[in-house]
Image (tube, rainbow, N blue to C red):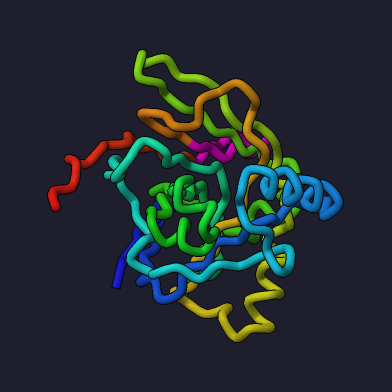
Amino acid sequence: MTRLSFELPDGETVQVTVRTLLNAGYAGRSQEEVAAHVAELAELGVPAPSVTPSLYPVAPYLAMQTEEVPVQHGRTSGEAEWALVVTEAGVLLTAACDHTDRALEVHGVAWSKQAGPDVLARQAWRLDAVADRIDRIALTGWVTGADGREQLIQQGTLGELLSPRYWLERLRADGLAEPGTVLLSGTIPMKPGVDQFAAAWRVELADPDTGARVSCGYTVRRLPAPVG
């Protein structure tokens, strides 16, 4: 089992063993916009989900706090997201990046999620501590190209996505709101013209009231070509 460790603003460290890892999909607050996005993806060959929002269980060992993600080819990319982490000490909110195999995505979204890790930050906030301003928390993603230049690729707020409260209610209904469950939120749109197939990804949550930030970042390392 994967064990994660999070540092809280008061200096406390909370550890959790991941037993259930879930990736939300098509999780925009406006489901009308989600429906339009599904139609766009269908034109690219990505199969439409049977229901939205979607929820994809993936192997718990894919939850990682790492600075490097190895990949098998050049068509993988991250997604700026937030994550809920249910612990014995309460529910935490942190930054996350869902690294996805885009070549595999056209054959099945669930398969593509299983082919890459969910990278989480090493810092977190108690969800209760930011609940009163949750929709105003900024969610931002950057990519670094082969030229070493960092570019903004995603920028929005948590108000654009289904709320942590919504997902906690779903988890409770499914009997999954228990220590060891980690849920990633789904993502916000990427900016056109920015190459998502990048050499590095960075994701940040920013609290508008305190200026506090929680972030994760990693480089993407291409594995050697397969033999056989």
Q: Nearer the viewer, residue 166 or 105?
A: 105
71 vs 121, left or right, is: left
Looking at the rendering, the stretch of residues picked out in magenta corresponds to 203-214
Q: Residue at image x 60%, y 21%? A: 193
Q: Residue at image x 65%, y 25%? A: 192
Q: Nearer the viewer, residue 152 or 222?
A: 222
Q: Residue at image x 45%, y 46%? A: 103
Q: Position of residue 107 (x, y in %)?
A: 51, 58
Q: Position of residue 50 (x, y in %)?
A: 71, 69
172 vs 108, left or right, is: right
Quadrant of the image containing the N terminus = bottom left
Q: Is residue 61 visible?
A: yes
Q: Position of residue 9 (x, y in %)?
A: 48, 48
Q: What is the quadrant of residue 63 in the picture?
A: bottom left
Q: Nearer the viewer, residue 56 or 141?
A: 56
Reply above or below: 134 against 1.
above
Residue 51 magenta: no
Reply above or below: 85 against 185.
below
